[in-house]
Image (cartoon, rainbow, N blue to C red):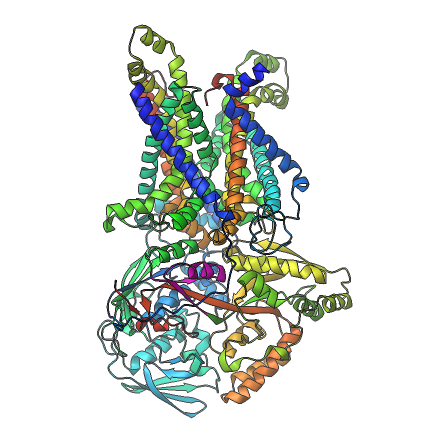
Amino acid sequence: MSSYLIRRVLFVFVPTLLGMSILVFVIMHMIPGNFVDVLLGMGTDISPDQVAAIERAYGLDKPLSVQYIYWLGNVLRGNFGNSLRTGKLVGTEILSRLPVTLELTVITVILTLVLAIPTGIISAIRRNDLADLIARLAALIGLSIPGFLFGTLAILFISLKWPVLPTTGFVPISEGLGENLKSLLLPSISLAMGMSATVMRMTRSSMLEELRQEYVQVARAKGLSERLVILRHALRNGLIPVITVLGIQIGYLLGGTVIIEELFALPGIGRLALNAIYQRDYPVVQGTVLFISFVFVFMNLITDLSYSVLDPRIQLEE
Amino acid sequence: MKLIVKKHNYLLLALIVTIALILVSCGQEPVKEVEKIKEVVVTATPVPESGPQAGGTLIIGKGREAAGLDPHLVTSASSFEIISQVYNQLINLSDDYTPIPELAESWENPDDLTFIFHLNPGVLFHNGREMVASDVVYSFERIKNPDTASPWATQLDKIESMEATDDYTVVFHLSEPYGAFMSTIASTWAAVVPQEEVEANGDLQSVMVGTGPFKLEEYVEETKTVLLAHTDYFEGAPMVDGITYMIIPDEAARIAALRTGEIHLTTLSDGTAAGLAARSEGVSVASQQTTDYYLLGINCAEAPFDDVRVRQALSLAIDRKAVIDSVFFGEGLVSGPIVPTLGEWAIPLDKLSYYEPDPEAAKALLADAGHPDGVAFTITASPRFPQFTSIALVLQNQLKAAGFEATLDQVEWGTFIRKWIDRDFQTFVSYNGSGNDPDRALYPALYTGGSVNAFQFSNEEIDSLLDSARTTVNFDERKAYYSDAVIKISEEAPMIFLNTRTQYVAYGDVVHAFDLSPVDAFRSLKQVWLLSE
Amino acid sequence: MRSVYFLVRRNLIGVLGGVVVLILLIIAIAPGLFAPYDPTEMVGPKLSPPDETYRMGTDRYGRDIWSRIAWGTRISFEVGFLSVLFAAALGVILGIVAGYFGGATDYLIMRVMDAIFAFPSVLLAIALVAIGGSALSSIILAITIVYIPIFARVARASSLTVKEREFVTAAFATGVGTPRILAVHILPNILSPIIVQMALRLSSAITVEAALSFLGLGAVPPTPTLGSMLSEGRAFMEISPWTVLYPGVALALVILGVNLFGDALRDMLDPRLRGTA
């Protein structure tokens, strides 16, 4: 297992992130308009010489390959560079935004677990019952309403009819947990809709699969109560693929909060990355995208590992 | 077992009912009585009998974070909105664009090349030190210094030298007569800053130390900016204890926050939003026409628009009033080369050529220019400013009647700027600021090789008129030059001047004594007071 | 008759979905038959509420919302189908090549795929559209690139198993050229998981397009897309909710239909999972 881990990190994890960083770098520099253009905007009285001087000051005059190697060298020494716009360390920028995205993710995951797993189990047990039908329909609807659409309609509804929740902005925990949670409730629900639909469907199909297995039949035959059969046997194995899906979904979530953060004006990682793309703040884009990808790849790795821990029958192999 | 399932069934049911309720209640909306987009009603909040109250924190919803805080280095309105509360200039302009005292209590103008300013004594910087004449000299030297790389440096080209003859007297010597001198130094960027703070911090991008009515307390990126009252302000302490700017990019979200009282005041981008805000309980909207104007920029260096007749046809094919109606729901004034809002400087529209919409005449001009089948071209716009896209769409629709076939090219903002710099467009939608003087409005945009002359427009007659106006100090003589220039510009149509930009500020009914000023929208914040519940 | 009833009862959701998909597809194939007006023409009064003339009301420019939705549905499908199709084609080629040749080729291709896959998809699409501009073609290209790795992975995994089968080794032994083995023997055998994957990714491709439009980075106006209608309508939603509500419902229906279609296709082609979702 540990040799697998080392191989996986060395030959997959690291090269993926390296490739990613080259990809971000190339793509960002292919977008027309550079940092200085956006900084100066239109119509300022600056001579081409002055523009060149500013580009030199930000190191943007060097060939791309040199810029990349310079950046990579710094990253290997643990320095992700400074934001061109604010001059602050990229690491500091990410850390200051992380709590918002992290909190959003945690609340979303909790909502998902509470909503999806019981529903999925019931749906499997009462297959083709009315409850199952309704749950499946609800899951389909949840899957079919993109988070930004749900968020938009929720803002419309809340601000018109039920102004108890703030429709925008972020209240830090330091200003009270209640207010803080309130400010994240709508965005979390918007994100949890699709996610819980996916998780519910996975729970259902995996539970159905398990309930068909021989050992469940045997357990039933032994005269164990249905409740025990489900809770002690089917659920344990049935939740393994659910955890996989959940892990991958959490990985997606960090990158997927961009639009929701933008819609609800939450100062999270996604918006940091989005604005950095708009402003061509190259080091910030590099840093945030690398961070999001790192979490994504890491979550996949963890998921794989937990898979083998939960189910010893599964051998890890590349 | 059964029991558990039952319980969860209720949960499920509750969930479904909630979703259904949300959908149903939203779904009922369309059949409700429809309100038309009306002109914005400005309702003044009644002054309570108790009279003005001091104290409280004014919370302002800000759409865009300040892009830097150094008055000498920044260019964006999002920065100046805060800077104007923290810094002062030597002088300011009244609402009809005439000079009024600020840090200078009076001035003399012994000849066209000399200006002597007498400073108010006892003005304190936020660090406690008294502001004196050498600070004024330092500040202007800093802007002019090439090492500062100030985008405003060229505006001060005409200043040859400055001297502080004593602590409260500054003398400016100009190299040649400069008609726009007073309005130039009245600009917000011409702020007086303390030398020691610049030297201690490198620049003033993230610290603010001015002489203004408010001082910077806290700056939390992308979240908020907190200002506190400068109690030693030389014109008297502000009424409120402080101003907190909350960054809320989404406009609908700002309106919602205003309604729930989370914020007290916010700027709104257009009449739709303003109308929406004005209909809310306890919210008032103030609006005014700014000196900014929307425009359709034309690449005059390339076919087909290098032919003046094609540009004239474009000008004739466009119904500016209809643009105001469709895009801005009637809010805005048709603009000539000098905006009608620039006080005494405005030139009546009926003196201009090619301004009355006439698609048939436009067609004839096109045929005359060798395009009997019309002209196809692209309009470049950016979704960063949705109203640009709206203007482009409405123009596209209008232009069909005159035989113009316009296609939209929508690009991301950074790309838009790059295209603008490279002159890589046929036409584009944007807006220009006119500043506080016709020189600022016309010279950079239309003088041959001017800094914002993206149109690559060049006309000797117009250049010479703009030069003459620039070096003339007498108002009537200057205005005569501008009048000739404007008429000539309308004949040449280097860009389509569309209409003025309306500025909207919405505020809750706890806010009192707020007044929009055309020169500096938030000038009145030091007098604003909050009614405590 | 009884069996139809039985079918409907057993798979109510599936039948419902089939009907939704069918209606949407017909609209998407021939929006001109259903749309009374040109979707880009400013035909009526601004923000007029739904009535007999404008069944779903008009938007801020006086364009007929129903006509825009009809054409917008077409564009949603068009972008979705084309980008998934291109992504599948490119992904399959890369995946088969990687799976068949193995070794360094495999390693290199798959690491590039991993790198793209790890890039947050919305941000990647935004950056790519910023490079290519807001033409429909560049949006399709951006979404294609986002989804290539998924197909490459599936194709690689499937071709790895197919490669070991007898008929492939036999073909190799008789001296059949590599491209021919790939095209004739491996490709047809991995088609069914690819088609299932295409059906499942279609809805996310449509969602990404709508999200781009919603952020103002979608197709060039006045192109009617459901996402841009949503984002344009947002400023008016409190006074004219129909500007947001109808396009929103239409978008949800399109995605719902595509999801149902995907589920059905998966059940059909992947019997192992039949009836599990």
Q: Residue at x 37, y 28 (%)?
A: A8
Closer to the camera, C89 or C181? C89
Q: Outermost residue, left direction?
A: B128
Q: Residue furthest top?
A: A222
Decide: is B282 above or below B434: above
Instruction: Return the x and y of residue B287 as percentages of the image width and height.
Output: 45, 68
Of residues C116 and B326, the one drawn nearer to the viewer in this rendering? B326
Instruction: Please identify the quadrant where the N terminus of chain C is shown.
Output: top right
Q: Is residue B285 magenta?
A: yes
Q: Which residues are magenta?
A: B264-287
Q: Position of residue A297 (x, y in %)?
A: 38, 34
Q: Position of residue C122 (x, y in %)?
A: 47, 42
Q: Is residue C40 above or below residue C170?
A: below
On screen, residue B415 versus residue C42, left or right, reads: left
Task: Name the residue: 38% across, 51% down.
Answer: A265
Q: Is residue A114 magenta?
A: no
Q: Is residue B138 above or below residue C131?
A: below
Q: Quadrant of residue C195?
A: top right
**Apparent side of residue B240 relative to residue B179 in the rendered image (left or right):** left
